[in-house]
Structures are given as C-alpha cells and as structure tokens.
Image (cartoon, rainbow, N blue to C red):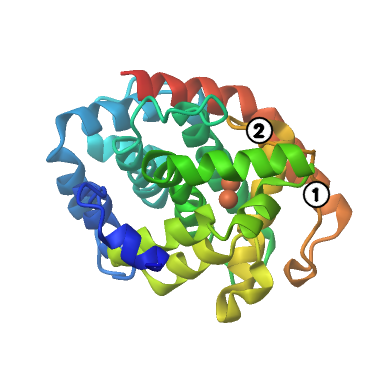
Amino acid sequence: MPSLAQRLDAIEDLPTIPHTMQAVLSSLDSVSTSASRLEDIIKEDPSLTAKVLKIANSSYYGASQGISSLSRAIVTVGFEEVRSIVVGLSLSGIFCDDLGFEEFDAVDIWLHSIGVATCAKMIAKEVPDLDPDEMFTVGMLHDLGRILFCLYFAEELREVLNCMNSEGVSLAEAEEKCGLGHSDIGAHLAQRWQLSPMIVKVIRYHHNYNRAGEFTKAAAAINLADSLSILIKVGWAGLGPPQKTLIPKILGLDNTKVKKIAQKLQDQREELVSGWSNLIKT
Ligand SMILES: [Fe+2]
Ligand SMILES: [Fe+2]
C-alpha cells in the first residue's frame, strides 16, 4: 500500500502555495524586510489591498479615521500584524466553499484558524521563547490538513467519522485508529510548500505536542489555543464528545493566566468572527 506521502504526491491538483503567502513567509526570517517591501507584495494584488485596508479600518483595530493607503495601514495596524493578516487572507483563497461534508464547513474552519492564530498569539505573549507573530502564522496554518482530508480522502474521512460516532471516541482518536490524520496531511503539504521546519513540525504534532522535539513549546501553544478556540466556538467548534481543556505544563501557565486569555478571546469573539467573515465574502 502506498504511503500517505506517495498518495498525496500522486494528486495532481494539490494546491500550490499562494504566491503572496510565499512572498510574505520567505521574508519571515529576514530582519531586513521593510514596510515598503511588504507594501509592494500586497500591492501586486488589488483585492488583497482592498481587504487589508478594510481590516485596518475595522472596529477590531479601533481605527477612528479612514485609512486609505497601505503605508498608513501598516503604520496604524503594525508591520507584523499586517504580515500575519496577509498570510490569513492568502490562505482563504485556497479554501473552496463546499468541502462535501456537513461536519466541515470551509468558512467555519477558516474562522477556527483565525481563532487559533489570535489565541496562540495571546499565549505566546505570556510564554518566554515564543514569538507571538510566528505563533499567529502557525495557528493560521495548523489545520490545513482538514481541508485536504475532505477534498482528497473523502472515503477515508467518512470511515473516520463513522468510527468516531460508533465508538464514541474523539475525532483525533478516530483518525489514529484509521491510520490517517489531518495533522500528517497538513504537514506534508507544508513541507511541499517548503515552509519552515518549525511550521511543518508544529502542524504535524499539534495534537501530540510532546513529540515535537525542539518545537514542543510551540506545538503546545497551538494545542492550547486549539482547545480554547473550540471551547469558545470561534468558527468550527469540533466534533465528537467534548474534550477537556488541558494546560500543557511546558508552557508554565497557571489556571488564572489561561482563564484570562480565554476571557480575552471570548470578548473578541464577535468582532473576530464578523470582521473576518465579511472579508471572506468580499
Ligand atoms: Fe487539528
Ligand atoms: Fe484546530
């Protein structure tokens, strides 16, 4: 039987990395990337430009005056923040509307990714050695494999869902039993897209963070952000029996701190969902 990697590689219409995402991510490591380079990348795409301006003017960023230029948007919203938004927006472009499963709605999954990204950024601000903007980006990408699972392995996914329902196990456990998981599928695509080893590993192990080696802390942060976003129902709210939110020890966060983060996400939930849903629909 061919391996998952072989099966994925055999799919001819596997999505290629969105051009803007590649441009923005390849500049992630270079300190020299300037605001003007970012502006140039965005400018190449008129609809992206319009969306960045729209989000800069949204109540979420609290802009009181009309922002009509990209350079102004970058100054007001912040360079890193705009870069993260571009990753989020370019990803929405490869999410087709109908995934063929009533359990998985594309917009809901995309909103879930925004929720996890936002929450992971909040967590990273409280945990030493984690870069908040990097965590936002990984949060955005963590469930990339869900989309591919629906689109390219529909039969197997049906099997996973049947197993989850008949055995009363979690979705992650059902995936494990069936030997095919969204984490591996997503990690494989991320690797193909030549994303950084950190991103690939965190995608692969976001449900098993202890196995993420040097990136355990980052994977643990995404794991916690995932649980909190599902609990607070930012977009897709999970399937199967409700899971307990466990705080990974490695993050060194106590209950009070996590509750504060959860409250903050809860407070921003409505603005996040309405702001970003509007963007996808335009
Ligand atoms: Fe996941
Ligand atoms: Fe997730």
> Which one is earlier in the sequence, the residue at label 1 or at label 2?
2
Q: Residue 270: where, in percent of width, then height?
A: 61, 22
Q: Residue at x 79, y 45 (%)?
A: 243
**Kind of residue indicated by mark 1:** Thr
Alpha-carbon span between mark 1 and mark 2 = 13 Å
The residue that appears at 40% across and 52% down in the rendered structure is 80
Residue 224's disc number: none
Q: Estimate how packed mark 2 is, as few (under 14), some (14 to 19) or many (20 or more) residues with alpha carbons within 10 Å.
A: some
Which residue is the extreme one toward the bottom?
214
Label annotation for residue 245: 1
Q: Quadrant of residue 42?
A: top left
Which one is in front, 157 or 1? 1
Q: Nearer the viewer, residue 85 or 227?
A: 227
Residue at 37 percent across and 70 percent down: it is 196
Residue bearing the label numbered 2: 237
In the picture provided, is 123 more to the left or to the right than 179? right
> Assess mark 1: CB under 8 A from ligand 2?
no
Q: Position of residue 231 (x, y in %)?
A: 74, 37
Check disc 1 and report its element: helix, strand or loop.
loop
**Residue 273, image x, y percentages:** 54, 25
